[in-house]
Image (tube, rainbow, N blue to C red):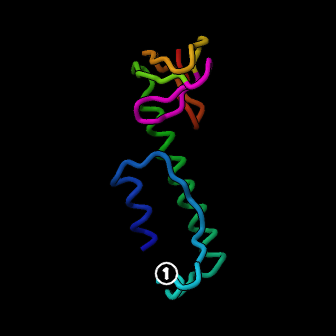
């Protein structure tokens, strides 16, 4: 089942993962299931985070050279229509939409030209 989770990152073109270990809650069906050893859980979470980081870097790289519509959330930061964070190159009025060419990325966010 874990291998299928890894495969879903590629199959669904996921780029922003929120990975956390499962914490059983008393009385829930999942709490009655056999639990995975803690060291296995940590290793799987690490692998899934790495897979997500690689997918994000690949996606960010694919945006270089494109012009993206960005909602400025502060003078120097914004988000694309796909909610990808962008560091803006020029001060921009928060709340405004701007079209910006993408010059690069830092592994976490796009960098406007």
Residue 58 colored in magenta in the image: no
The part of the image, by quadrant, that contains residue 36 is bottom right
Q: Residue at x 61, y 12 (%)?
A: 91
Q: Residue furthest left?
A: 11
Q: Is residue 87 above or below residue 51?
A: above
Q: Image point 56% across, 67% down: which residue?
A: 44
Q: Position of residue 53 (x, y in %)?
A: 54, 47
Within-10-Å neighbours for mark 1: few <14, some 14–19, many 20+:
few
Q: How many marks?
A: 1
Q: Residue at x 34, y 52 (%)?
A: 12
Residue 85 position within the rendered picture, expressed as x and y whole percent measured from the top left:
53, 32
The stretch of residues the image draws in magenta is: 73-87
Q: Quadrant of the N terminus?
A: bottom left
Foreground: 80 or 61?
80
- In the picture, measured across the screen, residue 32 lies left or right of residue 62, that is right
Residue 96 position in % (x across, y down): 49, 17
Residue 82 lies left or right of residue 104; in this view the side is left
Q: What percent of the width, then of the height, locates residue 46?
A: 60, 61
In depth, the one of 73 and 57 nearer the eye is: 73
Q: Residue at x 56, y 55 (%)?
A: 49
View extreme (top): residue: 90
| Image position of 27 with respect to 93: above or below | below
Camera-side residue: 79 or 107? 79
Residue that badge 1 annotates: 30
Taking the magenta stretch, the answer to whether it contains residue 84 is yes
- SS at mark 1? helix
């Amino acid at each position: 089942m874990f291998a299928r989770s890894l495969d879903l990152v590629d199959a669904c073109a996921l780029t922003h993962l929120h990975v956390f270990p499962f914490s059983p809650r008393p009385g829930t069906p999942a709490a009655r299931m056999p639990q995975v050893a803690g060291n296995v859980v940590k290793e799987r979470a690490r692998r899934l985070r790495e897979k997500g980081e690689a997918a994000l870097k690949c996606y960010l790289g694919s945006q270089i050279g494109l012009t993206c519509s960005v909602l400025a959330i502060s003078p120097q930061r914004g988000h694309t229509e796909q909610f990808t964070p962008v560091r803006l190159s020029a001060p921009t009025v928060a709340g405004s939409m701007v079209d910006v060419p993408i010059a690069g990325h830092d592994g976490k966010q796009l960098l406007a030209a």
